[in-house]
Amino acid sequence: MTDESRSLAERPQGTRRREQTARADTEPAPRPRSPARGHFLATARGTDLTIEAIAGIAGAVNLPMVSRACPVCGSDSQYRVFKEASFDASRWDRFAFASRKTPEYMHYRLLECGRCDVLYANPLPTRESLEAAYREADFDSGEEARYAGDSYAEFLPAILAKLSRRAAALDIGTGDGAFLEHLLGSGFERVVGVEPSRAPVEAARPSVRGLIRQSPFRPSDFERGSFSLITCFQTLEHVYEPLELCRSAFELLHPGGALFLVCHDRRALSARVLGTRSPIFDIEHLQLFSRASLSYALGNAGYDDVGTHAVVNRYPLSYWARLFPLPARAKGAALGALKQSGLGRVPLALAAGNFAAIGYKR
């Protein structure tokens, strides 16, 4: 691990639990808050907006918003405003809630939790409006999904060696099922994926399409203690209650099973250098984790032997160019030149600021 991640989240499990219990005894319990609802102005931008002023999106978009406490530790008092909202809902199109899209450089109001180190959006769209947005989102990143799956599959041998058995595997936010192919080749008795968007499921290869349930992840759809491995890649930032997802996955795992996550690292060098011009600051992301905050969440959800690891992603040059915060005209010219020369299809491996977190149910 890097020095920046050596924090409370990486202390021994028993020590973390004792410290968390001690804090719970000395810190006031989070106060319940009534949801603040409204319907936005089309543009929310600036540094002087209150929750009330940004609690909704333009009537044309009809995206109501609600307030919340920290989605990892529950605190609603230990925070600072990291960035005020900056987005224009009128610019959203069918790819606004699609995976691996061209960055729009928009985000909700972001708070930094002083207790667990997560960044979280407050206010945020209602669960129902987000589910509707994801259901209708478009998809055009099948090639990039295969590259990502190959990168994440490099962690599988070490994880498989620690599993008590290979009963079933579940991939949450599976997209077009690219990673399901790796799971099928890993000897699991049963493989299933869940994906809220219609378009990627329709684009899935015939070999895996029948394994995908087009639906948000609902723990009640699965038998408790039935999975050996649950994977969730760059999806935890998108879900309404990330801690509850981790806890639900824990209940679905049998003893000796593992949860394998990949997330953006908000404290990575790329995020610190680019600031809100980093593609991780996006209206799809309801929270952004550091290694410390995700390890904290996994510890609270009951996992042992939690470890975090840098991810090296391998993508074509054209995809990296799409992510880089160039002016629109310059980016268009660069992408055109890469396509015309054929260099855009050349793969490049970079440690771009993602990390894996793996926890086990003992």
Image (tube, rainbow, N blue to C red):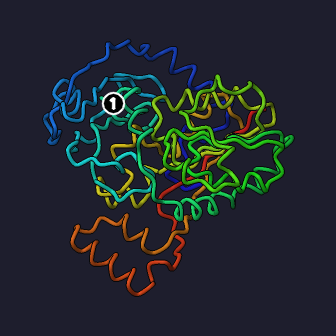
The residue shown at (28%, 30%) is: 63
* Location of residue 189 (image quadrant): top right
* Location of residue 117 (image quadrant): top left
Classify residue 45 as left or right of residue 31.
left
Per the image, the residue denoted by label 1 is 125
Q: Nearer the viewer, residue 294 or 85?
A: 85
Q: Is residue 105 visible from the viewing direction of this image?
A: yes
* Rendered position, 134 above or below 143: above
Point out the image quarter for the C terminus. Answer: top right
The residue shown at (40%, 26%) is: 128
Mark 1 neighbour density, 10 Å: few (under 14) some (14–19) many (20 or more): many
Give the percent coordinates (x, y) of residue 3: 53, 54
As drawn, which residue projects farthest toward the bottom? 341
* Rendered position, 75 above or below 134: above
The residue shown at (39%, 33%) is: 130
Point out the image quarter for the N terminus. Answer: bottom right
The residue shown at (30%, 29%) is: 123
Classify residue 163 as left or right of residue 244.
right
Say what secondary structure mark 1 lies in. Answer: strand
Classify residue 241 as left or right of residue 149.
left
Q: Nearer the viewer, residue 362 or 52?
A: 52
* Rendered position, 308 above or below 253: below
Give the percent coordinates (x, y) of residue 55: 23, 27
Q: Nearer the viewer, residue 122 or 191?
A: 191
Q: Nearer the viewer, residue 63 or 135?
A: 135
Q: For the residue marked with disc 1, what is the amino acid?
A: Pro
* Rendered position, 157 above or below 244: below
Q: Is residue 305 visible from the viewing direction of this image?
A: no
Give the percent coordinates (x, y) of residue 341: 40, 87
